[in-house]
Structures are given as structure tokens and as C-alpha cells.
Image: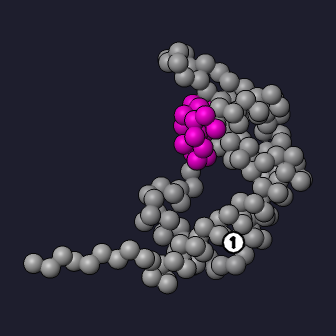
Amino acid sequence: MAVPETRVDLTETELAAWRGLLRVHTALVKALDAELAAAHDLPLSSYEVLITLESAPDRKRRMAELADSVLLSRSGMTRLVDRLEKEELLVRDTCTDDGRGCFAVLTDKGAELLERARPTHLEGVRQRFLSHFSEDELRTFAGAWERVLPGAAATD
């Protein structure tokens, strides 16, 4: 019985789709990060933490959940939270039901910075990405992201 041949290389179309995704993502992240840093002295990773906390109940999340939601390792999240805490943009709060864990809590100062930075970030997202596509194309993207990673396009 013949063993089915397995394809090792990507087809030209597969490679173009994959490389395109990586290159566009990298370019967008660099540009959006630079805009936020220049206008508000706020790196994109910090903006993501603050926006995630703002939308959480009581403006707080467990550190592990926060790391998962912004795609950082737990040690990376700890270092970032250390910096944000020194800048008084968030505070740590202990979990009363779990003495080992702790919450990151958005401060009023963090919420104020986020409010100032949000228009800069959203305009950058619209200009650099969204404006290139129709509403139908954006729905198609959202559907594709959901097929790859369920929940990836969730808006809540």
C-alpha cells in the first residue's frame, strides 16, 4: 500500500497569505506603538492592559487573566504591571478568596490617560487598517479569525 505524500512546503498562495498576515501585523503594531508613545508616552502593550482593565467589572482582573487577554507571558505581564504601578496607572489588590493571586486595578489616573490616548489609537487603527476594507470585507475577516481561533473576534 502506498503511503500518501505529505506536502512540506507551503504553496505560493499559502505562503503569501501567511507572510502577509505576519508582515501586516508587525507593521501595524510598530506604527500604532510609535504613535501612542509619541503622543502620550504610552506603549501599545500598556494601552492594551489599561483598556482591558477599563472594560472589566470594577476595573480589575486577575493577573493571569490579564496576561492571557493581552497575549503576554505571566512574567512579562508582571514586569509590565510593575512599570504601570510605578506610574500610578494601576494598583495591585490581593484576592480575598485566593491568597496566592492578585488583581490589577485601573486607577483614575490610568483611566484619564486611556481616555486621552484612545482617539489617537482608534484613528491609527482606522487609518492604517480599517479604511482599506469595506464593511463586508471586515465581516469576512472577523469570520476568518473565528475559524482559526474561536473567540478571537469577540467584541465584549
Q: Is residue 58 above or below residue 140?
A: above
Residue drawn at (65%, 78%) of the image: 133
Residue drawn at (57%, 31%) of the image: 62
**The stretch drawn in magenta includes residue 105:** no
Q: Where's the N terminus, which quadrant?
A: bottom left
Where residue 36 sits in the image (x, y, percent)?
82, 53
In this view, the residue in front, 131 or 45, is 45
Name the residue tied to disc 1: 130
Q: Is residue 66 above or below residue 29?
A: above
In this view, the residue in front, 118 or 3, is 3
In this view, the residue in front, 58 or 12, is 12
Q: Is residue 107 left or right of residue 155?
A: right
Residue drawn at (83%, 31%) of the image: 87
Residue drawn at (43%, 76%) of the image: 9
Residue found farthest to the bottom:
12
- Specify the quadrant of the image occupied by residue 137: bottom right
Q: Amino acid at mark 1?
A: Leu
> How crowded is the residue under tag 1: few (<14 C-alpha within 10 Å), some, or many (20+)?
some
Q: Is residue 62 above or below residue 48?
A: above
In this view, the residue in front, 98 or 115, is 98
Query: Number of callouts in the render?
Result: 1
Q: Which residues are magenta?
A: 55-76
Where residue 65 sits in the image (x, y, percent)?
54, 37
Q: Secondary structure at mark 1?
A: helix
Where residue 19 sits in the image (x, y, percent)?
58, 73
**The stretch drawn in magenta includes residue 56:** yes
Residue 12: in sight, yes or no?
Answer: yes
Residue found farthest to the left:
1
- Specify the quadrant of the image occupied by residue 30: bottom right
